[in-house]
Image (cartoon, rainbow, N blue to C red):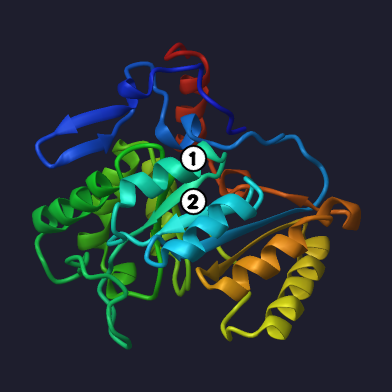
Amino acid sequence: MPARCPPLDPAVLTELAPIGRLPRVDANGCMPWLAYAAPFNYRETRPRVGIVVLGLGKDPQVTQRAIDGLPPRITLAFASDAPWLDRWVERARARGHEVLVMLPVQTTDKPLDSTLAPLRADITPAENLRRLQMVLARAGTGYSGVIVPTTTPLNSAEPALRPLIKEISDRGLLLLETFRTGRLVYQLSKELGVPYSADAGWIDRQNDAGEIVANLQALEDFTMKNRFALAVGMAQRETVERLIAWSKDIEARGLVLAPVTGLTECLDLCADRVRKAMTGGVR
């Protein structure tokens, strides 16, 4: 099961590249997604529910409130083009949160959420890798993984997608897919040893307190029935405030709040990599 690697100097998980700091797997196999995992009992038998707050970093007040007010087991995801992204990541990590970075991706039905050049199905693998590394370098260090945050032509374009997921694997990161519409991202993640997760739905499609509360109750009901659930919400003040109130007594309602690493599938090659990391590179 996932667990933290042996204590490490963060520098051994960082590659100093011309474009900035990039995550890397250390010589003994420790991966950033393990090293930066929040404390959690992976043998926990109570139903696990997780929340990821998306799009942080653009509104400083909402972002700081989320970092300070939300419990550490709620995962924080930052927009790839957020000003001072690496500093926000450091602040969130200092408060104990797991951190993810949202990838800018090609869309077909709505404007881009990021001002950065998106990952696309119709450009060369080399250009996609350059764009991916630029995002990773902006975030610095301390984050556990990345998010494919919306439906995208990439999700069905294996020639474009495979090199990107290989790079995510080589960097020792996890992958969260939202708006999952097919199996290719999951299949490639499993093949290439990337820990994978997908959300069960949104809590705040409408920025309305009553709807958010109702959706959180529906999420609890779903979790009690299915034992595991991960949902996402946006970086909105109403969402953050409702989550702060909802999470205070969650264990009294029979659930345990889990970070994204506690709701991530890691099988086959991924599990082999974890075993190697936990034994310092010795199988």
Amino acid marked by disc 1: Arg
Q: Position of residue 178 (x, y in %)?
A: 48, 67
The residue that label 1 is drawn on is 93
Count of residue discs: 2
Q: Say if 231 sits above or below 215 in the image.
A: above
* 55 sits left or right of 206 in the view: left
Disc sitting over residue 101 in the figure = none
The foreground one among 162 and 239 is: 239
Q: Position of residue 215 (x, y in %)?
A: 71, 77
| N-terminal-most mark, 1 or 2 | 1
Mark 1 neighbour class, 10 Å CA radius: few under 14, some 14 to 19, many 20 or more: many
* Residue 195 shows in the view: no
Residue lying at 50% horizontally and 65% vertically, measured from the top left: 62
Q: Residue at x 17, y 66 (%)?
A: 117
Q: Looking at the image, which is closer to me, 130 or 184?
A: 130
Q: Residues within 10 Å of mark 2 (few under 14, many from 20)?
A: many
Where residue 201 sits: x, y (%)?
Answer: 60, 73
Which residue is at 75% across, 63% downward? 245
Q: Quadrant of residue 217?
A: bottom right
Q: Disc 1 vs disc 2: which is toward the camera?
A: 1
Q: Vertically, is 259 above or below 81?
A: above
Look at the numbered disc 1 and give the secondary structure of its residue: helix
Judge left or right: residue 137 versus residue 17.
right
Asked if the residue at tag 2 contacts the one at tag 1, i.e. Cβ–Cβ closer than 8 Å, the answer is no
What residue sits 68% from the left and 78% below the top? 212
Residue with the mark numbered 2: 196
Where the N terminus falls, by quadrant? top right
In the depicted view, which residue is nearer to us: 13 or 120? 13
Residue 46 in the image: above or below residue 210: above
- Spot occupied by residue 22 in the image (x, y as percentages of width and height): 25, 37
Secondary structure beneath dot 2 equals strand
